[in-house]
Image (cartoon, grey):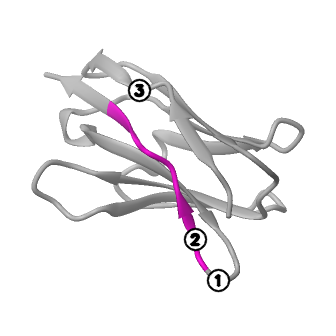
Amino acid sequence: QVQLVESGGGLVQTGGSLRLSCAASRSIFSMAWYRQAPGKQREWVATISGGGRTNYADSVKGRFTISRDNSKNTLYLQMNSLKPEDTAVYYCKAYLIGQDSWGQGTQVTVSS
């Protein structure tokens, strides 16, 4: 198992930026960001592998950037040009053999 702690959420106006962080208790090869808006299912946002390969959902491509600092076991999500539809609780996920781990989530609210 691994412990994941997200931070960096908050309230921002449309067009603004936020940077989310996810601190892991140990190194993880592959990690991802997901989000869940009120009344909706949790959806995948972006993934990064240990080698740095990244993938993004079409809804955030060109606006969000996933990155990691392996020396700090920390995952990031830089979110630019935020829209009201980006409002959600954002979760980081660690892909593990056996059972994946999730953080507790951090709220992002984008006002119009």
- Tag count: 3
Name the side, left or right, on which 59 lies relative to 109: right
Tell me the residue that label 2 is attached to. Answer: 100
Real-space Cα distance between discs 2 and 1?
A: 7 Å
Please give the label number shown on residue 9. 3
| Element at label 3 | loop
Binning the other alpha carbons within 10 Å of mark 3 as few (below 14), some (14 to 19) or many (20 upward) gives some
- Give the x, y percent position of residue 62: 49, 45
Q: Earlier in the sequence, mark 1 or mark 3?
A: 3
| Vertical arrangement, residue 73 with respect to residue 11, above or below | below
Q: Nearer the viewer, mark 3 or mark 2?
A: 2
**Nearer the camera: disc 1 or disc 3:** 1
Is 38 situated left or right of 71 in this image?
Answer: left
Q: Amino acid at mark 3?
A: Gly
Q: Amino acid at mark 1?
A: Gly
Q: In the displayed image of the protein, which residue is found farthest to the bottom?
A: 98
Labelled disc at residue 36: none
Q: Position of residue 98 (x, y in %)?
A: 64, 83
Which mark sits nearer the N-terminus, 3 or 2? 3
As measured in the structure, the alpha-carbon distance from the residue carrying label 3 to the one carrying label 2 is: 23 Å
Q: Which residue is mark 1?
A: 98
Cα separation between marks 1 and 3:
29 Å
Query: On the image, which quarter does residue 85 sit in?
Result: top left
- Magenta-span inclusion, residue 23: no
Residue 111 drawn at (x, y percent): 17, 21
